[in-house]
Image (cartoon, rainbow, N blue to C red):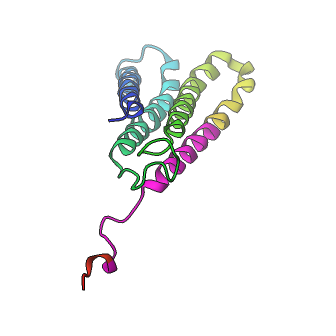
Amino acid sequence: MPRVSVIMVRTALLWWGVGFTLGGLVLANKGLPFHGAVWTLRTSHIFVLLVGWLVQFSAGIAVWIMPRLVHPGVVTGSCDRGDLRLVWLCYATLNAGVLLIALYAPLSWLGGSDASVLRWLPALAGVLWLMASAAFVVNMWPRVRPVIEPLTMMVKE
């Protein structure tokens, strides 16, 4: 398993723990209300679990399990899994976006009327996720190939 996959899976599991902790706080506050601001964590809970855990875990496993390049060095010249710097870029931008969106609602609540400065955080998180998606696709696309060999290769005369 490449190192970047290990790091992505471990970070996804950390986000999983954070997400379920946030969800537990929101659920506990629903049963025994202790602070109204806890409801601001609901959005953070959703994005941490959806993007921080599920998307990152899937991406880390995909980097590891997708077929390796047939001719290493022809496509990228670096290794049989392509240019892993793109996957590291995916990792960094994905986690930065999750962190920004997770902090947005609580910081908006704390800022009160001065929270207008923070309105750019969701848009920035979206741009970071778009960069992460593009880096991931650029790395993976050369590794996508059919499972079954073409019919001309299978027929022997």
Residue 126, how many percent across, how many down?
61, 40
In the displayed structure, 61 sits above or below 26; it is: below
In the displayed structure, 132 sits above or below 155; it is: above
Magenta segment's dominant SS is helix
Residue at left 59%, top 27%?
Answer: 100
Residue at left 32%, top 35%?
Answer: 1
Frontmost residue, 6 versus 10: 6
Tell whether position 127 is magenta: yes
Q: Residue furthest bottom?
A: 157
Residue 124, how many percent across, how many down?
66, 34
Residue at left 45%, top 29%?
Answer: 45
| Left or right of 144, for residue 132 | right
Residue 44, how many percent across, how many down?
50, 29
* Quadrant in which residue 154 is drawn: bottom left
* Count of residue discs: 0
Q: Residue furthest top?
A: 34
Frontmost residue, 52 versus 78: 78
| Left or right of 90, for residue 60 | left
* Quadrant in which residue 81 is drawn: top left
Frontmost residue, 14 versus 102: 14
Tell whether position 154 is magenta: no
Residue 132, how many percent across, how many down?
55, 40
| Left or right of 77, for residue 1 | left
Residue at left 41%, top 46%?
Answer: 80
Quadrant assignment for the C terminus: bottom left
Q: What is the span of residues highlighted in magenta in the rendered image?
A: 126-152
Q: Residue furthest front?
A: 157
